[in-house]
Image (spheres, coloured by chain):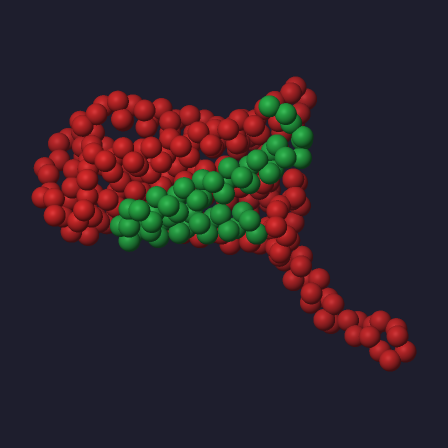
Chain colours: A red, B green
Amino acid sequence: MIEPTKSTGWQRISFALLHVWVLGVCVVVIGAFLVQFIGRELPCPLCLLQRMAMLLAAMGPMFIIHRVTSVDSEPGADFSTGFGMSIIASVLGLAISGRQTLLHILPGDPGYGGAVFGLHLYTWAFIVFIVVILVSGLTLSAGSMMVVGTRRGRPGVWSRITGWVLGVVIAGNVVSALFESGTNWFLPDNPTNYQLIEEFRGYMDSRSSVVDPSGQKAN
Amino acid sequence: MVAAFIFILIFGTFVALRRERRRESLIFFAISMVGVTLLFLHHATDTLGLSF
């Protein structure tokens, strides 16, 4: 086992920043949930893809947070692996959100869904991915100064809370995507209702309607 | 259903991270990335018939 190393001020800031990063991504995805449920705007396929890329980008810092207390922790290697994961996911997210931004960029196009603080959600997603890449680059550029050392014992309270919040957000997306797609393989380009609920209603309607012997259908 | 399945894969990555399984979490992460990329290609480029 690697002995715990004493953290410097910068390393503590770096460790706190990892939590802020994960929670920040969770806040953005929860904001998208609010638009979905309160604003009644169903996410399109590209919106869901951006959520996926955002959650995958949050896996990098989560990886580092959990590796620092691991018995086989390798601080330098784990640090670069985590940021590498985030950069790869963010590049993909940048491509997806960039594609959707360009899709609606022409003058006169109202865009998909409502705007939040003057920008559509896919434009916000584009900004988030750029910020993630910039922060990752800057942190990696700082070298060993920002590398979080090993810690003994269980993850701290904040690490556990951060993990739980991220887990709940991912689980919420699983349920939401299931409801939206129903039994279809893919989502339509402009979803208007929750397919699973519609299919359930259709199933219940077909069960409640009774066909009498004369062949006439009655409810 | 494909989107929900990819979210489940992301959840698998998360569970592997929580259990401090380095290799499994990286494998789940890679599979999730491939899934997101393929779904993006399906939604964004396949139907347009683009040529690069």
Left or right: where does residue A46 sit relative to residue A106?
A: left
What residue appears at the point 67 percent right and 35 percent down from the top-left corner?
B47
Please tell me in which quadrant of the rendered image residue A144 appears.
top left
What residue appears at the point 67 percent right and 30 percent down from the top-left corner?
B49
Residue A150 visible in this rendered orientation of the protein: yes
Q: Nearer the viewer, residue A181 or B20?
A: B20
Above or below A217: residue A29? above
Q: Position of residue B6 (x, y in %)?
A: 49, 47
Residue furthest out toward the top: A107
Q: Position of residue A112 (x, y in %)?
A: 62, 33
Q: Position of residue A123 (x, y in %)?
A: 52, 28
Above or below A192: residue A119? above
How many marks on residues?
0
What residue appears at the point 64 percent right and 20 percent down from the top-left corner?
A106
Left or right: where does residue A190 sit relative to residue A144?
A: right
Residue furthest out toward the right: A214
Please tell me in which quadrant of the rendered image residue A135 appears.
top left
Residue furthest out toward the bottom: A213
Please tell me in which quadrant of the rendered image residue A62 appears.
top left
Q: Nearer the viewer, residue A131 or A108?
A: A131
What residue appears at the point 32 percent right and 28 percent down from the top-left corner?
A136
Q: Nearer the viewer, residue A52 or A167?
A: A52
Quarter of the C terminus of chain A within the rendering:
bottom right
Above or below A159: residue A94? above
Residue A104 visible in this rendered orientation of the protein: no
Q: Position of residue A141 (x, y in %)?
A: 26, 22
Above or below A198: residue A204? below
Left or right: where does residue A206 sit relative to residue B19?
A: right
